[in-house]
Amino acid sequence: MAARLIATSPFVGIAVFVSLIALVAFYYKPFSQQRLFTVEELALYNGTDQSFPILLGILGSVFDVTKGKSHYGEGGGYNHFSGRDASRAFVSGNFTGDGLTDSLRDLSSTQVKSVVEWRDFYFRSYTFVGKLVGRYYDSEGNPTKYLKGVEAKAARGAQLLEKQKNEEAKQPSCNSRWSQDEGGEVCLPDVESNYRNQAVIVLLSQFL
Ligand code: HEM
């Protein structure tokens, strides 16, 4: 009787369909937002097993870099970044042994900023697939104090660079340099532009 009702009533069919969608929506957590990796799990995705995607961690964010297989796959120039978080190597250029660490200890604020920029690069260029549990994310996937500290330091690095840029802009321009092999450097004043500036002042003073 019930089977007959289900088979004949369109409303029951719709109700079953809607319930199924709700169940799927509730339980399905997209791979890209949910996955938490341990160091050991991430290591499986280092490009050795061709049937696995190649994953790379930076500041605890994990990206699928399979489309960059020529760099990140076995034998590729940047294969040492695959299957791990080697955040420090993005600025140290030390791709061996202890250099392949996620610790940014003792790096300057501008170096830390560079690492954050590399992470931005991966967000722009590759697919984010999850987080690595450890230094940067806890077992719930929440950012750790260390990550917050890194981001604050990167922001200080950005401020410092901005300040330096403004200071440099205030310096008189220098159109000519002379340097001895290993010796000092002499910066000659930009005579031409000084004359030009003076000419403008003289011209303006006639009207003001
Ligand atoms: C701290 C040092 C360095 C780091 C961390 C670094 C990192 C990287 C990474 C991660 C990529 C791949 C980007 C992608 O996914 O598309 C890359 C690409 C590249 N790097 Fe480096 N690199 C460094 C130094 C150098 C140096 C010194 C050179 C040149 C002498 C160089 C030349 C290249 C070239 C040509 C590519 C592009 C390869 C291609 O698209 O086929 N890199 N680099």
Image (cartoon, rainbow, N blue to C red):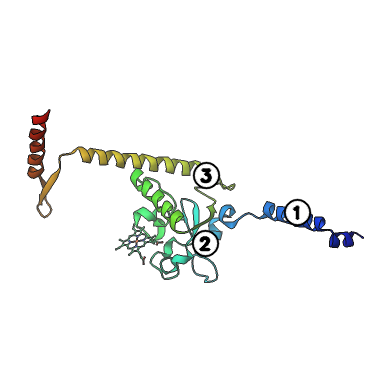
Residue nearest the observer in this picture, 169 or 199: 199
Q: Which residue is mark 2?
A: 43
Q: Residue at x 37, y 46 (%)?
A: 113
Mark 2 element type: helix
Label 3 lies in ligand 1 vicinity (Cβ under 8 Å) = no
Residue nearest the observer in this picture, 139 or 128: 128
Mark 1 surroundings within 10 Å by alpha-carbon count, few (fewer than 14), some (14 through 19), many (20 or more): few
Q: Quadrant of ligand 1?
A: bottom left
Q: Which residue is mark 3?
A: 143
Mark 1 element type: helix
Which mark is on residue 19? Answer: 1
Residue 90, position as x, y percentages in the image: 38, 55
The amino acid type of the residue labelled 2 equals Ala
| Quadrant position of the N terminus in the picture | bottom right
Q: Do the residues bearing badges 3 and 2 touch, measured as CB atoms within 8 Å?
A: no
Q: Earlier in the sequence, mark 3 or mark 2?
A: 2
Examine the rendered structure and indicate whether residue 97 appears above or below residue 191: below
| Quadrant position of the C terminus in the picture | top left
Quadrant in which residue 169 is drawn: top left
Which mark is on residue 31? Answer: none
Looking at the image, is mark 3 or mark 2 nearer the viewer?
A: 3
How many marks are shown on the rendered structure? 3
> What is the C-alpha distance between the residues marked 2 and 1?
39 Å
Mark 3 element type: loop
Residue 184 located left or right of residue 45: left
The amino acid type of the residue labelled 1 equals Ser
Q: Residue at x 56, y 60 (%)?
A: 41
Residue nearest the observer in this picture, 172 or 182: 172
Mark 3 surroundings within 10 Å by alpha-carbon count, few (fewer than 14), some (14 through 19), many (20 or more): some
